[in-house]
Amino acid sequence: MNILIVGGGGREHALAWKIAQSPLVSSLLCAPGNPGIEAHAECVDIGVGETDRLIALAKERDINLVVIGPENPLADGIVDAFEAAGIQAFGPSKAAAQIEASKAFAKEIMQRANIPTAAYAAFDDPVEAIAYVREQGAPIVVKADGLAAGKGVTVAATVEEAVMAIESAMQGHAFGDAGARVVIEECLVGEEASILAFSDGSTVRPMASAQDHKPALDGDQGPNTGGMGAYSPAPVVTDAMLEEIQRTILEPCVDTMAASGTPYKGILYAGLIITEAGPKVIEFNCRFGDPEAQVVLPRLQSDIVPILLSCCDGSLAMCDLSWSAKACVTVVMASPGYPADYPKGLPIALDAPLRDIDNGGLLFHAGTARKGGQLVTNGGRVLTVTAMGETIPAATKNAYDAVGKVHFEGAHFRTDIARKALQHLA
């Protein structure tokens, strides 16, 4: 069959790498793709927001399945558009993608489904939001309601910091229209974990657990980013807890959305915090996490293509998901200055090719380009350097050994990815 992936980041590189392994695939395209994806798929220079051009490409190339990577086109209704054109697409509808596109919508679903989460209030008026913060006190969490590339969240240690976050989002337009409304939540205490799941609208199957690292600096310091690294499995999520997450979070969410007339198909991503009272939802996302995809997909031993198809046609209950016992770790190498302003066009050099995730590591390209034959930086998060190992310590060592073979000016990366896992294991 012929498959088209929409996107051009590290997540889409991981998807292309995994999908290309399927014996069911006759041809694989990616739009727009990146220099790393070129090793697995034909890259076509069409942007993720150019829906009409993507549909025309799919018709011209007789595409049987379209896999949507990023959240923005999903929130804009790209799956609806492909389905209206008679082309099967993997991902939630525009209505269902509100689970990520509007944090207030997600909170309403959680309330109706009785899903454990933080107490909250949503505001369209900054004066009312600030008054609420002064009444509640700190620490407190301020979130831009809409899509903000993972950067619209402030965990405020003081009331003043929360007020600044509200003013920045609602009056300073730091996140554009995404910050016109804010959601203010109680600050939950615990360790974070990511559970991604496949859903066909009625059946939901969790994937292997993972843990992302959002803050830019070691020790979870500095501003939030799109993610600076991840590992899988996350020891904080035990087998019993995963069953609890399935029963109290994933299934109620999918059931409630189906009952609401917005059946959820695609990837349901639950960002969790493991509190003393058990797992609670910080946020839902409507797509594979980035960089979580880079550590979860390598551990999936099953052919991913039948799973993607089953989510589209409602037959997920008949699919088996098999997971490797090995661990996987990815370290994001970012441009100097990220997540603030950063340069582009910095030459990238490798001491040795990184092509084997089990032997020396693998580079998933996130923000790269070619300039005169030279691989250069072209984004904030440039590369996700990924490796497997028999244990988390082994995978961590392999990943950082691989990082040491990659060079570009001012390369920034955290040195403590997976340290929490090592503490659990100790």
Image (cartoon, rainbow, N blue to C red):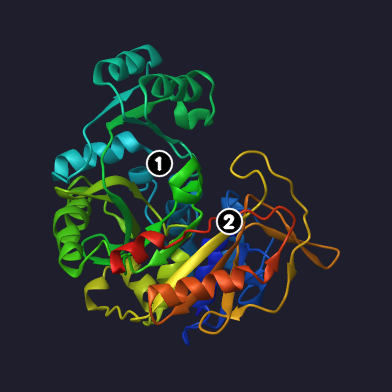
Whether residue 13 is situated above or below residue 223 in the rendered picture: below
Residue 229 at x, y = what percent?
49, 59
Whether residue 342 is situated above or below residue 366 in the rendered picture: above
Callout 2, which amino acid? Phe
Whether residue 284 is situated above or below residue 201 in the rendered picture: above
| Between 139 and 92, the one nearer to me in the picture | 139
Find disc 1 in the rendering and name its residue: 101
Q: Secondary structure at mark 2?
A: loop
Find disc 2 in the rendering and name its residue: 413
Callout 1, which amino acid? Ala
Q: Is residue 22 left or right of residue 283?
A: right
Residue 196 at x, y = what percent?
33, 61
Q: Secondary structure at mark 1?
A: helix
Work out which quarter of the rendered image holds the C terminus and state it: bottom left
Point out the tag, 1 or 2, that comes first from the N-terminus. 1
Whether residue 426 is situated above or below residue 160 in the rendered picture: below
- What label does residue 397 carry, if any? none
